[in-house]
Image: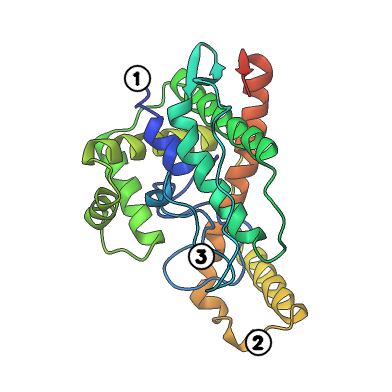
Amino acid sequence: MKVPSSRALRRTLAAVTLTAGLALTGCSGDQAAPSGGSDGGGQPPAASDGGGAPAAAGGEGGAQQAPEADVSDVPDVVATVNGEDITKDEFVPIYESQFQQMAMQQQTTGEQPDQADLKGQVAQQLVDNELLLQGAKDAGIEATDEDIDATLEEVASQNGLGSADEVVSSLEQQGMSAEEIREDAASQFALTAYIEQEADIAEPTEEELKQQYEQLTAQQSRAGGDTSQIPPFEEVKEQLAQQAVTQQQNEAATTLAAELREAGDVTINL
């Protein structure tokens, strides 16, 4: 099997996110109260990749500008994974996107993001993605057109969109081509299938979902929130189940990537 180009995949996933990864959502294993059709993932749309810096903090009049990402020290080849290069062009949009998130989160504290540490984290994320893609290739996993369509439909469902066509339209507005989107979906399918093949991913039981819901309610209560705003269990049961599966997938992906990294030849140049 020829694994589809992972450049767009890396741009949109930016980490080992295994479901609904096509830029519209991120990993949702540890989210707060569920709401709406989206899984509430914390990753921004891919349109923000490489975009401008966040707006100035503090409103008008002498507000302190948010720091800018410094990529001047990023080498042309950020890492090499079993002979496959991860380039600066692939690294920079992801790093800038994650840097912007961190800078916005730290505006209230006045802290400055640790750019060296964040660069290392992003590089490791990309290495892990490449290892898993190579693992899927070695396992002979290949997405059919039907698999790609089903993956896009799943993304649509998890993001409150009506169809796979709406997913494609949304991502095309962010600058991706239909071919890139289908390549991403094929890679997304391969990653998910590989994780499910190699790990024991179990659907949560009704009892487990109720415990998860009770924990969510208790967490909201301890935080001083209004628990009446949390939707009834039956309304969010499906989303809770998806979050539980996603968490298992991400944990399995982390373990698999570590095993592949230990057995492989990985060089990070940061």
Callout in the foreground (1, 2): 2
Where is residue 147, by image quadrant? top left
Residue shown at 52%/72% (left/top)?
236
Is residue 238 placed above or below 127 in the rendered structure?
below
Left or right for 1, reference 208 = left
Q: Tell me where residue 105 appears, x and y as whole percent.
A: 63, 60
Instruction: Answer whether residue 244 is visible to the viewer in this image.
Output: no
**Type of the residue with mark 1:** Lys
Q: Tell me where residue 119 appears, x and y as whole percent.
A: 62, 35
Is residue 21 placed above or below 183 in the rendered structure?
below
Residue shown at 51%/65% (left/top)?
239
Callout in the foreground (3, 2): 2
Measured Cα–Cα span from mark 1 to mark 2: 51 Å
Q: Which residue is mark 3?
A: 239
Measured Cα–Cα span from mark 3 to mark 2: 20 Å
Secondary element at tag 3 = helix
Residue shown at 31%/53% (left/top)?
153
Secondary element at tag 2 = loop
Where is residue 31, by image quadrant? bottom right
Secondary element at tag 1 = loop
Q: Earlier in the sequence, mark 1 or mark 2?
A: 1
Q: What quarter of the picture does the C terminus occupy?
A: top right
Of residues 209 and 1, the one nearer the viewer is 1
Q: Which residue is mark 2?
A: 226
**Type of the residue with mark 2:** Asp
Residue shown at 73%/74% (left/top)?
219
Q: Tell me where residue 57 appears, x and y as whole percent.
A: 57, 66
